[in-house]
Image: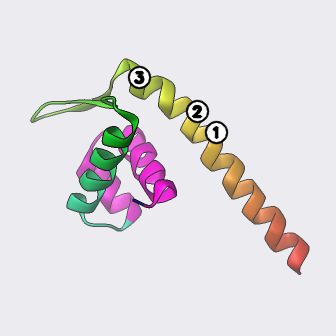
Amino acid sequence: MDKVAALRAFVAVAEAGGFSSAARRLEMAASSVVRSVDSLEESLGTVLFNRTTRQVTLSEAGATYYSRTKKLLEDLADADDLDRAQAT
């Protein structure tokens, strides 16, 4: 599992409110997004989303993980930007 890709998929689902919307946002197949989130949940040993046929919402653990993951991905993007700026 590509952990960063799985984290991006997780954040996208949380923000988009569903797997299909997140997949469109990420330009990925919905099944790939589902697999990424499933793998992430399995590796963490917890459920990140409460899923019904009509709705996907963050679980309590998912809400905590989202806030930390969102910050982590923002810091990673900032570091990438800094590296690019220093390379030019």
> Which region shows up in magenta?
2-26
Q: Residue lying furthest top in this view?
A: 60
Q: CA distance from mark 2 to mark 1?
A: 5 Å
77 vs 84, left or right, is left
Amino acid on which disc 3 is placed:
Ala
Considering the numbered disc 3 on the image, is that residue within a helix, a strand or a loop?
Answer: helix
73 vs 15, left or right, is right
Q: Please give the residue where the numbered disc 2 appears in the rendered image.
A: 68
Q: Which residue is pictured at 29% across the width and 52% down the height?
A: 21
The image quarter containing residue 44 is top left
Magenta-drawn stretch contains 27:
no
- Tell me, yes or no, whether the two marked residues, 3 and 2, touch with CB atoms within 8 Å: no
Considering the numbered disc 1 on the image, is that residue within a helix, a strand or a loop?
Answer: helix
Q: Earlier in the sequence, mark 3 or mark 2?
A: 3
Q: Which mark is residue 61?
A: 3
Amino acid on which disc 1 is placed:
Lys
